Amino acid sequence: MIAHDRLNEILDGFPKAKIGLVGDLFLDRYLDIDPTVHEISVETDLEAFQVARVRNQGGALGTVMNNLSALGVGSLVAVSVIGDDGEAYDLLKELGPLGIDTQGVVRDATRQTPTYTKPMKQDATGAWRELNRLDLRPREPLAAAAEKQVLAHLEEVFDATDGLIVLDQVPEEGWGVVTPAVRERLAQLSGRRPERLIFIDSRAHIARFRRGVLKPNLNECLGAVGREASDDPQQGREAAVELSRVHNQQLYCTMGADGILVVDPKGDPVPVPGYPVEGPIDIVGAGDSTTSGIVAALLSGASSIEAAAIGNLVASITIRQLGTTGTASPEQVRDRWRNTHAA
């Protein structure tokens, strides 16, 4: 779907891009349990897992940041809300080396920093497996004062960047950073400058965005048009076309190993096949790496089909990184293209 020279041309444009990132910023905390040490708790008579290493990294919107930074995107500006706690300290510490402008990240002392804690333990084969995740995330609506600051930062970042990525991770309406008021402001900004890219990934509310480019998966498309979840990919593709045409918005529907369906409301959908991957995979963060590849490519002059192909390339690299949320560098993308086409 993309020639090698064209791929290089697009990748060379990544350092020139300036991207705003708006939405839910999490801390991903990995606890690597030592499988060789066994200790029974005196109090509970249960095994007390012994953590040998703690690994912190940005999650949700932070995963997108990690991927864009690894791809060599020139400038990243964040708009989000986190707490004023130890998790916030750890999260900002991880983002610091990425060179991200975090002036638009609001610190709200009444809010806990969303955190996914992931205990990791080796199984009998030596492979690392994630145990039950421990989630610390918003359980009430975003405070009015924090929302007001988000709206102000959003306008500034929209005007100062080449395009926005919006990540709406929290499923409860109004509990995350992307509240109804933020969605409405995004629509207003897009109406003011329709040529500027606003790329939207929403776990539960994709149909509520009135403007922008949408990036749902097959089941999110089904839910957005009021259909039941289905294992039949054809039903998901039909829902993607329906969603695009009803809302008159372009969308990139991710389809796992089958790649991406690029849908324009006024044209025929175009399937962009995924790149084959062998061996064990870890799909955590695959959607965010796809988003990063697509948006960086679009802002570097790629067509929608070329951008989807690059998104697929990036995801085919990140899912091979087990026990972590993977990233891909431009050189890894080039190598993946060469290895695939040489096979």
Image: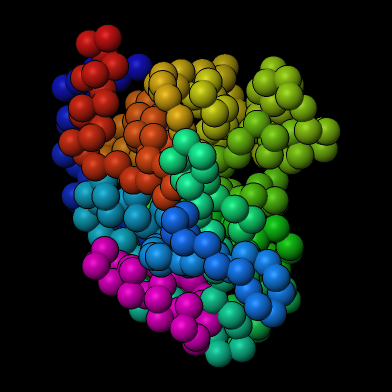
Q: Nearer the viewer, residue 124 or 105?
A: 124
- The reply, left or right, for residue 150 in relation to residue 46 is left
In the depicted structure, whether residue 267 falls above or below residue 153? above
Instruction: Tell me where residue 243 appears, x and y as whole percent.
Output: 69, 34
Q: Nearer the viewer, residue 287 or 42?
A: 42
Q: Is residue 4 visible?
A: yes
Magenta region includes residue 98: yes
Q: Is residue 21 visible?
A: no
Work out which residue is located at the far bottom of the displayed protein and give it: 109
Instruction: Tell me where residue 253 appears, x and y as whole percent.
Output: 57, 32
Magenta residues (range):
78-100
Magenta region includes residue 29: no
Residue at x 40%, y 76% (from the top left corner): 90
Q: Residue 92 is drawn in which quadrant?
A: bottom left
- The reply, left or right, for residue 241 in relation to residue 123 is right
Q: Residue 305 is drawn in which quadrant?
A: top left
Residue at x 70%, y 70% (from the top left corner): 45
Instruction: Tell me where residue 286 appears, x and y as whole percent.
Output: 47, 40
Q: Residue 89 is drawn in which quadrant?
A: bottom left
